[in-house]
Amino acid sequence: MPRSVRVRLFATARLAVGRAVLPWPVPEHGLRARELVAALEQAYPRLAPTLRGSRFLRNDRYLRDLDETLRPGDEFAVHPPYGGG
Amino acid sequence: MPRSVRVRLFATARLAVGRAVLPWPVPEHGLRARELVAALEQAYPRLAPTLRGSRFLRNDRYLRDLDETLRPGDEFAVHPPYGGG
Amino acid sequence: MAVRLTRRPLTLAEAERRLRARPGGAVVVFAGRVRRDRRRGSSVVALEYEVDRVPALARLRALERAARRRFGASELVLWHRLGRVRVGEVAVVVGATCPHRVEAFDAARYLIDELKTTVPIWKEERGRPVRRPPRRRARPGVRSAGSGRAP
Amino acid sequence: MAVRLTRRPLTLAEAERRLRARPGGAVVVFAGRVRRDRRRGSSVVALEYEVDRVPALARLRALERAARRRFGASELVLWHRLGRVRVGEVAVVVGATCPHRVEAFDAARYLIDELKTTVPIWKEERGRPVRRPPRRRARPGVRSAGSGRAP
């Protein structure tokens, strides 16, 4: 069992970080979505504006709020505003 | 030169009269569209309700009003409400 | 031809060939099909379309010009079948190619709404051919403009 | 399949085969094409579409169900290209078969509006391949949802 979540970055989020997938360590006391987003923002300042306009998913489901706790092995997706069509 | 107009009947007008084309004599003093419509109504009572809801054309152009005078050789079309599509 | 009155079958595929030949980000196509009449005892299997050809073509061309002007359409189709059209077949196709989707939807909607109410085309119901006269037969008649069964 | 994310070309003809297989008096289809970027100096020749596949398919299926319920649609298409789509090609097709035209227009409009704003698909501009680096090059970037160039 990995001690990390798998952060998946799309579109402008992927371009800001320079990669589509980013493993992120989960500390012993656990990791709230809110903490992960703050940590990503700090690690990748260019990602900050995108994060503020993004929706987030845990294991392919939209997060209800940022207080959800992520577990090791979870996927965490960052969805900037959609642009299909 | 015929001394008549060619009345063209469509859809319910055609069904009410039983034919699609009807030559109609033009008297010496001429024939206003209004007079033709009244005469048709009298000759074919079943046509009356259709005539009241129809648009009329002289030589493929919509009549501006029923005071237009028809000349021998003219075509006069009776268009009940349209139903394409 | 953007405007067409024809006895041949109509397809979206053919409309697509015309509408995609010109630039524009949005293509909207409407196809109206002959519906089965669900009234009890109905034997309607087709509609027969009648037209007053010269004013109908003039009006269709006027609609084409109006749609180019009002909605910035780069291409249009305004096609209608004549004669007998069986249940399930396409009786009318209208469509527009425009820069953006809002205009393309508005253009197609405008074309079919105007076509139905301002172009001299009429439909008449046609029943199933019967070999022996049945006890009671539904009497096919001309469908009025207000018929609920037109698409 | 009513719902599809594909790397293959999309056509109205293929949508027609699906939409005409079911009864309904009205078929409306929308095709969104990649437009040429008219900004000065732009070298964009294609868009590259990216998707988060599992939630995208779930959302498309939810839209399909909603359209059947809300507009009485008997058949639907919700198709989107993935990967590189060149200028002039069709990136998205949505369509609906309904009893009457008003619902069919509303359904198609609903599907494309919702698809654009609620389905996890993104586009990124792709420039012309250059052999020698030009003095100044337009920098292709991700098109935001608010881009005026999407249909």
Image (cartoon, coloured by chain):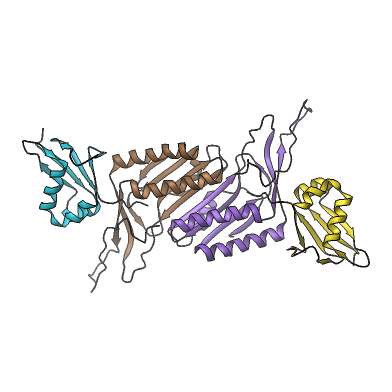
Chain colours: A yellow, B cyan, C brown, D purple
The answer to which of D55 and A26 lies nearer the viewer is A26
The residue at the point 83 percent across, 49 percent down is A19
x, y (%) of residue C144?
30, 57
Residue placed furthest toward the left = B28
Residue placed furthest toward the bottom = C135
x, y (%) of residue D52?
73, 56
Residue placed furthest toward the right = A28
D136 to B82, vertically: above or below: above
The residue at the point 27 percent across, 62 percent down is C140
- When asked about the image quadrant of residue D139, the answer is top right
The residue at the point 85 percent across, 56 percent down is A38
The answer to which of C43 and A43 lies nearer the viewer is A43
The residue at the point 61 percent across, 39 percent down is D35
x, y (%) of residue D39?
66, 32
Query: The N terminus of chain C is located in which quarter?
Result: top left
C28 to D41, vertically: above or below: below
C139 to C54, vertically: above or below: below
Query: The C terminus of chain C is located in which quarter?
Result: bottom left
Residue C1 visible here: no
The answer to which of C108 and C31 lies nearer the viewer is C108
The answer to which of C141 and B77 lies nearer the viewer is B77
x, y (%) of residue C27?
53, 45
